[in-house]
Amino acid sequence: FGVPAETAIRMARRIAANPGMSLVALHAHVGSNVSDPTVLGASYRALLDFAETLRAEGATTLTELDLGGGFGVGYSGKYTPLDLAAWG
């Protein structure tokens, strides 16, 4: 489930060198029912930073970030929902 960062960088370089290929998106899935906005924010920041690293390595076609799921939802009171207002 996923690719280590160093492997992804090597893959991005190979894709950038191949005129028939384009790296257009990165995807991350933080987890399920995450109710702490700082966890989500840190994960999204890490994905954005990694996207910037890949662009610097030649992945200039990278235009999309899929932040995946993870938002806490209060299913029947079993989980604490994510407080979007607290997120800012």
Image (cartoon, rainbow, N blue to C red):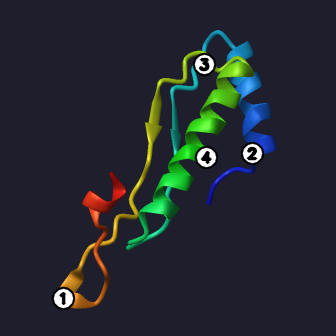
- Up-down relation of residue 33 to residue 63 (above or below): below
Label 3: which secondary element: loop
Nearest the viewer among 40 and 87 is 87
Q: Residues within 10 Å of mark 1 (few under 14, many from 20)?
A: few
For mark 2, what is the residue? 5
* Mark closest to the chain's N terminus, 2 or 4: 2
The Cα atoms of the two marked residues, 3 and 2, are separated by: 20 Å
Q: CA distance from mark 4 to mark 1?
A: 32 Å
Q: Which mark is residue 46?
A: 4
Q: Nearer the viewer, residue 36 or 61?
A: 36
Q: Tell which circle, 3 or 2, labels the residue nearer the N-terminal end.
A: 2
Quickly name the residue at label 1.
76
* Residue type, label 1: Ser
Residue at the spot of label 3? 21
Instruction: Return the x and y of residue 1 as percentages of the image width and height.
Output: 62, 60
* Occupied quadrant, residue 53: top right
Name the residue furthest left.
76
Q: Residue at x 55, y 54 (%)?
A: 43
Element type where label 1 sits in the image: helix
- Dot 3 or dot 4: first in sequence order is 3
